[in-house]
């Protein structure tokens, strides 16, 4: 690091990463709405049952025709703070772990990147679980073509109060184990594969480090890897969030279909086969790949713009 160089602070990294993720989720949310509905279609029905949506594109077209932009962007108000906070934790975690082992905070070390990615995902999942729950239920709701259990919340505040009144504190924690599994898997792959690909492209002089094409290529590889790794866990999470509930004699409100993510995956496998785990996989790809490309590309772009507009500092 050169004399007088200024390293991005935790707050600066948090804000730059958060803004990048907020931009990305606005673009990718329609595909996530389609993914959620496809994952719930034919739930625990042998042979798949009646198909309302034929594929990801059909789901988005029908949602647009029947519900308009509001239907396409269901859950967006919840998704923005969730995605913004999750990426924001990554850089502070990675630098802290590097420092604990005596490595430079600027070094991109695969193992620390993987651990930081998983840790940031877990923290985001634990803190944001009530909002993840609300987002899934909002995206599943369709007044025109209902799929799965339907819950109509007027807004996020109405969702929070309704869950508290009908399900109690346990309602906010519903599906947290599946959220940790899903998010840790995705986050542990997303940022490390992005950084590794970028370093390979730049290190072998294939593309320059400040090229948009470098950001796009690295993000595309990362998006594909994330989609392949996390799809079964993502399907389990969607179903656990949206499952109907039942009240036990002792007053506890529990999920009526699944006890845990492993139970969900097993029951899905028995009734729908392994393809049941991959329902909505194309929509997932259409969501996660552009989301990853935009998030990580915009993160680099925003950081570079921030450096350009911060006079008197040399950033690393």
Image: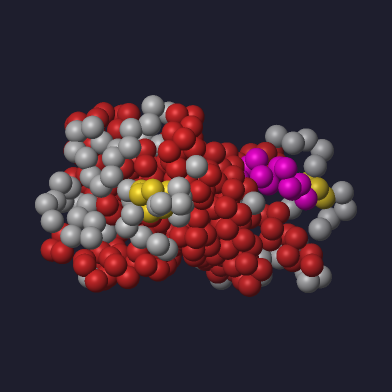
Residue 222 in the image, given as x and y percentages of width and height: 47, 61
Q: Is residue 14 visible?
A: yes
Q: Which residue occupies the foreground of this view, 85 or 122?
A: 122
Q: Residue at x 37, y 67 (%)?
A: 263
How many numbered discs?
Answer: 0
Horizontal side of 11 relative to 159 (left or right) equals: right
* Residue 64, quarter of picture: top left
Q: Is residue 217 visible?
A: no
- Tell me, yes or no, whether the highlighted magenta stretch contains residue 142: no
Q: How is the image coloured?
A: secondary structure
Horizontal side of 267 relative to 111 (left or right) equals: left
Residue 306 in the image, given as x and y percentages of width and height: 67, 39
Instruction: Please report the bounds of the magenta region as a residue range.
Output: 7-17
Query: Which quadrant, please, contains the N terminus?
Result: bottom right
| Whether residue 5 is situated above or below residue 115 in the rendered picture | above
Q: Residue at x 45, y 48 (%)?
A: 251
Q: Which residue occupies the foreground of this view, 294 or 259?
A: 259
Residue 253 in the image, given as x and y percentages of width and height: 43, 48
Q: Residue at x 38, y 31 (%)?
A: 153
Of helix, strand and loop, which mostly describes the magenta segment? helix
- Tell me, yes or no, whether the highlighted magenta stretch contains residue 11: yes
Farthest residue, direction front = 249
């Amino acid at each position: 690091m050169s004399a007088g160089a200024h390293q991005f602070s935790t707050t600066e990294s948090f804000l730059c990463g958060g803004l990048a993720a907020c931009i990305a989720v606005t673009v990718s949310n329609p595909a996530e709405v389609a993914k959620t509905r496809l994952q719930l279609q034919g739930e625990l029905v042998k042979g798949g049952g009646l198909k309302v949506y034929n594929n990801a594109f059909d789901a988005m077209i029908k949602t647009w025709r029947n519900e308009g932009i509001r239907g396409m962007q269901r859950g967006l108000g919840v998704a923005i703070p969730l995605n913004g906070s999750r990426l924001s934790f990554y850089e502070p975690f990675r630098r802290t772990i590097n420092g604990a082992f005596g490595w430079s905070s600027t070094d991109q070390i695969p193992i620390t990147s993987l651990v930081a990615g998983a840790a940031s995902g877990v923290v985001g999942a634990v803190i944001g679980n009530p909002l993840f729950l609300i987002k899934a239920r909002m995206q599943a709701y369709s007044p025109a073509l209902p799929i799965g259990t339907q819950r109509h919340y007027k807004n996020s505040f109405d969702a929070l109060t309704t869950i508290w009144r009908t399900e109690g504190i346990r309602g906010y924690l519903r599906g947290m184990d599946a959220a940790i599994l899903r998010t840790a898997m995705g986050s542990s792959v997303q940022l490390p594969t992005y950084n590794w690909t970028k370093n390979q492209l730049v290190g072998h002089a294939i593309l320059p480090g400040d090229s948009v094409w470098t950001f796009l290529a690295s993000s595309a590889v990362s998006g594909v890897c994330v989609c392949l790794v996390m799809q079964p866990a993502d399907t389990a999470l969607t179903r656990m969030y949206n499952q109907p509930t039942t009240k036990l004699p002792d007053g506890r409100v529990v999920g009526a279909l699944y006890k845990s993510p492993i139970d969900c995956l097993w029951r899905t496998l028995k009734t729908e086969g392994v393809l049941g785990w991959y329902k909505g996989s194309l929509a997932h790809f259409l969501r996660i790949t552009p989301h990853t490309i935009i998030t990580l590309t915009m993160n680099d772009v925003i950081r570079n713009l921030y450096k350009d507009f911060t006079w008197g500092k040399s950033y690393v």
